[in-house]
Amino acid sequence: MRIKILGSAAGGGFPQWNCGCRNCTGLRKSTIKATPRTQTQIAVDANPEYTQRTHWALINASPDLRTQILRTPELAPIASTSNSTPIYDVFLTSADVDSIAGLLHLREFQGFRIHSTGSVRRIMDEENSIFRVLGRATPPVQWYSLPMATEFSPTQVPDMREAPKFQVRAVPVGGDFPDYVGEKLRLRLNPSESVVALDLEYRGKRIFVAPSLPGRDGNWKKWALGSDLVLIDGTFWNDDELRRAGRGKKTAREMGHIPLSGPDGLLEQYPKGSKGRKILLHINNTNPILIEDGPEHRAAMDAGFEIAYDGMEIQL
Ligand SMILES: [Zn+2]
């Protein structure tokens, strides 16, 4: 599989338009060593052995999606065919604005497939009628329910005689529905479908994608341990980071993100002896790991993590 990180920041991007925190101000004034980032967006070449025509899948649809597609030559339409985009699928991990807003950039009368949990689809159908614009395409955008994988199942040995299949499953990680979902609808939704991670598999290689990881239970550790590549929640360094930066009252955990530092943080909790590459993404603009010559950036690297940046490419 070939993976491209088109955006690596949390909601708001880096810098964020209305944020005057140390990082955002330092980046604007070039007084810190840091790199701008757009909001988290991943693209996967889901059919790497079929060279006639590439077949890309998007993981979530960020508010920056249009710009991200335009600056990625692989995602440009193939000339002189009517249905010419190489983007066929979008996999959603939640109904958060940062996960779905970019679908509106894809509204130009284009048929493609959206894969999500049933609850995420209901939120979009019943509370966000603006997304009906996707139904104007001929054929219209098609919705599919993601298969759920509650227990970690070890990699099957692929049968090389069969055509390789790209498989995606949703892994419940225990999050919350977005604030904008009304009380009435919320009561009728399945909480385990609010925020999911994704397990991507192709020819026995496995990727675990968890841009939002509340860390309220330890189930994620088995997936992290058993995957060849882990793209994981690097949103906040400290639990009270937003309060310290004067950007809000909620803690990282209250917002559904396990912080990176501390004894219960991701760096300490990450299973030892994992075999795959581990990359932090969805990094909030307040996070000190964005300062490339700072101690937190160094600590994350020393713990064996890579820090995602826009344009990062991984071959598996
Ligand atoms: Zn900021």
Image (cartoon, helix red, strand yellow):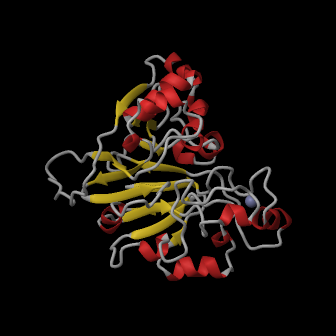
Residue 153 is left or right of residue 146, and the answer is left
Q: Nearer the viewer, residue 206 or 11?
A: 11
Q: Quadrant of the N terminus?
A: bottom left
Above or below 277: residue 9: above
Identify the residue shown where x is 70% and y is 57%: 14
Q: Which residue is at a point 32% across and 50% down the rendered structure image?
A: 49
Q: Nearer the viewer, residue 181 or 294?
A: 181
Quadrant for ligand 1?
bottom right
- Tell me which residue sits at (52%, 16%) in the image: 136
Q: Quadrant of the C terminus?
A: bottom left
Determine the image quadrant of residue 229. Answer: bottom left
Percent position (x, y) of residue 44?
43, 49
Quarter holding residue 139: top left
Residue found at the far right of this picture: 29
Residue 153 vertical position relative to residue 32 in the rendered view, above or below: above
Depth check, front residue: 228 or 174: 174
Residue 67: x and y, percent?
Answer: 66, 43
> Can see residue 113?
no
* Residue 221 can be seen in this image: yes
| Residue 62 x %, y % | 58, 43
**In the image, is 71 to the left or to the right of 279?**
right
Residue 157 as seen in the image, left or right of residue 270: left
